[in-house]
Amino acid sequence: MTEVWLWLWVALGGAGGALMRFWLSRFSAWRWGSSIPATFTVNIVGCFLLGVGLVWIGALGSDGMYARSSYIWLELGFIGGFTTFSTFAVETRGLLPHDWGKAVAYMLGSFVGALLALIVGYIVGGVWVYG
């Protein structure tokens, strides 16, 4: 697979992930008046998908074209475009002057939730791939 195809896979995955995050953020802003619920959700779901993907792609083998293109499309492209640490940081910064408690809860919930989602995703991926 040439480098041009790898770039295309990253671009397609990233565009899909970014569009999905955009739609969820718009829905969240419309439904709850804030994009914070969407950012929290996409980061937790993204970590879960990352855990599942790590096992699944690892089971494909590291030297195969299918494993490499899957890793590039899913892990680097889609999940990279879907999740957002920068928006999380901006939203947390916006909460700090007005509501320290909510800002701290958002930070801790995001960090702990992301780590737990990654672990659960890895376990679910292992059960799914290896039975």
Image (cartoon, helix red, strand yellow):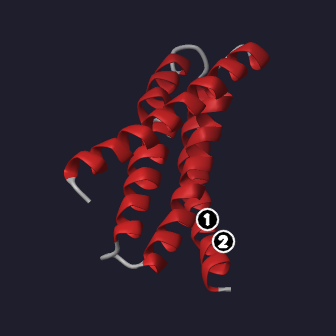
Residue drawn at 45 percent across, 22 percent down: 90
Q: Going by the picture, which residue comes out furthest to the right?
A: 31
Q: Which mark is residue 11?
A: none
Q: Look at the image and tell me in which quarter the N terminus lies.
A: bottom left
- Asked if residue 48 is positioned above or below residue 77 in the image, the reply reads below
Q: Does residue 101 appear in this view?
A: no
Q: CA distance from mark 1 to mark 2?
A: 5 Å
Q: Of 109 and 21, which appears nearest the observer?
A: 21
Q: Of 96 and 39, which appears nearest the observer?
A: 39
Q: Which residue is mark 1?
A: 121
Q: Does residue 108 appear in this view?
A: yes
Side of 119 where 81 appears, left or right: left
Residue drawn at 58 percent across, 14 percent down: 98
- Asked if residue 99 is positioned above or below residue 115 in the image, the reply reads above
Task: Report x, y in % for residue 22.
Answer: 57, 24
Q: Which mark is residue 124?
A: 2
Q: Of 50 and 63, which appears nearest the observer?
A: 63
Q: Going by the picture, which residue comes out furthest to the left?
A: 3
Residue contact between numbered discs 1 and 2, judged by CB atoms under 8 Å: yes
Task: Name which quarter of the figure residue 119 lies in.
Answer: bottom right
**Label 1 residue SS:** helix
Side of 109 where 66 appears, left or right: left
Q: Hey, what amino acid is under mark 1?
A: Gly
- Asked if residue 39 is positioned above or below residue 119 in the image, the reply reads above
Residue drawn at 44 percent across, 75 percent down: 58
- Asked if residue 57 is positioned above or below residue 75 in the image, the reply reads below
Task: Tell me the crowding category of disc 2: few under 14, some 14 to 19, or many 20 or more residues within 10 angstroms, Cα based.
Answer: some
Task: Report x, y in % for residue 25.
Answer: 62, 23
Q: Hey, what amino acid is under mark 2?
A: Val
Task: Name which quarter of the figure residue 30 lies in.
Answer: top right
Residue drawn at 68 percent across, 30 percent down: 37
